[in-house]
Amino acid sequence: MHVTGTHFTDRTDAGRRLAAHLGHLRTPETVVVALPRGGVPVAAEVADALGAPLDICVIRKLGVPYQPELGMGAIGEDGIRVLNDQVMRVAGVTDEQLAHVERLERAELERRARRYRGDRAPADLRGSTVVVVDDGIATGSTARAACRIVRARGAARVVLAVPVAPRDWVDRLADVADELICVGTPSPFFAIGEFYGDFSQTTDEEVLRLLAEARGERSRAPAAVDHELTVPAAGVRLAGRLTVPVHALGAVVFAHGSGSGRHSPRNRFVAAYLNRAGLATLLFDLLTEDEEPDRRNVFDVELLGSRLTEVSRRLPDLDEAARSLPIGLFGASTGAAAALWTAARLGDGVRAVVSRGGRPDLAGPARLAAVAAPTLLIVGGRDSTVIDLNRQARARLHCESELAVVPHAGHLFEEPGTLDQVSELARDWFLHHLPEGRQEPGPEGRRGPGPDGGQPSGS
């Protein structure tokens, strides 16, 4: 298939669109195997659509020493190694350099396999149709290694399925799979990420969550409402997803930043955490598909804030289950500025605000001073510039506020455990401020960092 306009919102969108091409594989013999980490969100959607079990095949790319993003091969579980002789020859990689890179990547491969699987054995693939899924094909080395591994584990039929690949991918990989399926093969092709709106790194926490959900070990609180919808706002219609648990205590409206939308994996992770705590969530796209390519819109806080304001006002009318719920706002990146802009506009209509790696300073001094809702600013400990901007913004707030610094976290909270800390902090803040009366933190207690990186409150 040759599609020059191939573009995905994020890996979840890519997985859903890929699944639409795989209906003929919905059989009891099918097993979906993902390549961590980026392939797991794609494969989770495929496995769900096919009603198939989901497993992983841990692969590590062997990058050229002075250009790590260029793959010269890959290694996988069971001692599999695949080398790209052409890349090695052109790059002039020596045997000693190859051995050094492989030694480092082998250690990381073993670490990830232990983290993702724990004591569980790999899925039994004997006699199965195995669908190997990644978020895209570049050189094909990792996909080749994965296909060889599942074949060695007894797969009767191997299907390699990806959202995007170069036009010659079939020529490269036809010898390792019985069937190759791709949503689009655009040209020119330079990197997988250019075909995604949000290609941020998948975290270990997201991988673990998706695998646990596929095994049925973790689920949201029972939902009275969980569906896609469109919300009219200022002459446009914005796509969203509303989830309302049974006996919900409040509702949190998410404001995404930096061009991401309702499928943002990090905000979906936090939203699922809040759902399990009994909080409703509304994730929606602040921009339309036509508006997203213009980066100026991402930083137009008045545009984003006015839309968030209108959507927040309309929330009680979107579904009967959300009609009487007190409202909180969760903003990420530039979405944090939009959340504070909205809180200033709506006054008592917003009970609490949480910012994750946000730019609250972009709301402007006047708006910040007008915010009445208790506000929690969460920043990664390694994100020094944004920490300073958050401190400056907090100094302009006249409401109850805290600055929580998550140790060892970067701007995107990709480090192991950091997004869980964000979720716990947000949960406790909303449970404390949203319901009528003051609520105690969830059953696990408040384990995250406290104000400005200090000890948790009450410790």
Image (spheres, rainbow, N blue to C red):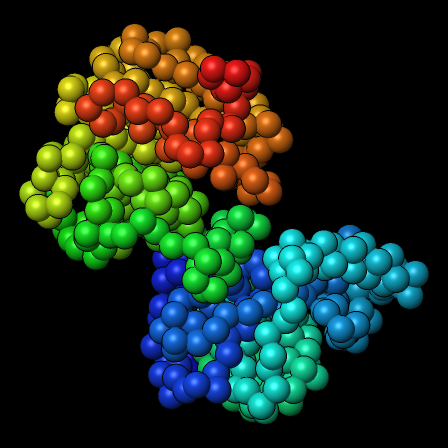
Residue 302 location (% of width, % of height): 22, 29
Residue 275 in sight in this render? yes
Depth order, front residue of 230/124: 124
Residue 239 location (% of width, % of height): 21, 53
- The answer to whether residue 304 is above or below residue 89 is above
Q: In which quarter of the image is the N terminus?
A: bottom left
Residue 194 location (% of width, % of height): 48, 58
Depth order, front residue of 137/291: 137
- The answer to whether residue 214 is above or below residue 274 is below
Quadrant of res 112: bottom right
Q: Which residue is drawn at 41% across and 57% down?
A: 10
Residue 362 in sight in this render? no
Residue 209 location (% of width, % of height): 48, 53
Q: Is residue 49 left or right of residue 133?
A: left
Q: Residue at x 52, y 16 (%)?
A: 459
Q: Residue at x 53, y 55 (%)?
A: 207
Q: Residue at x 70, y 63 (%)?
A: 61
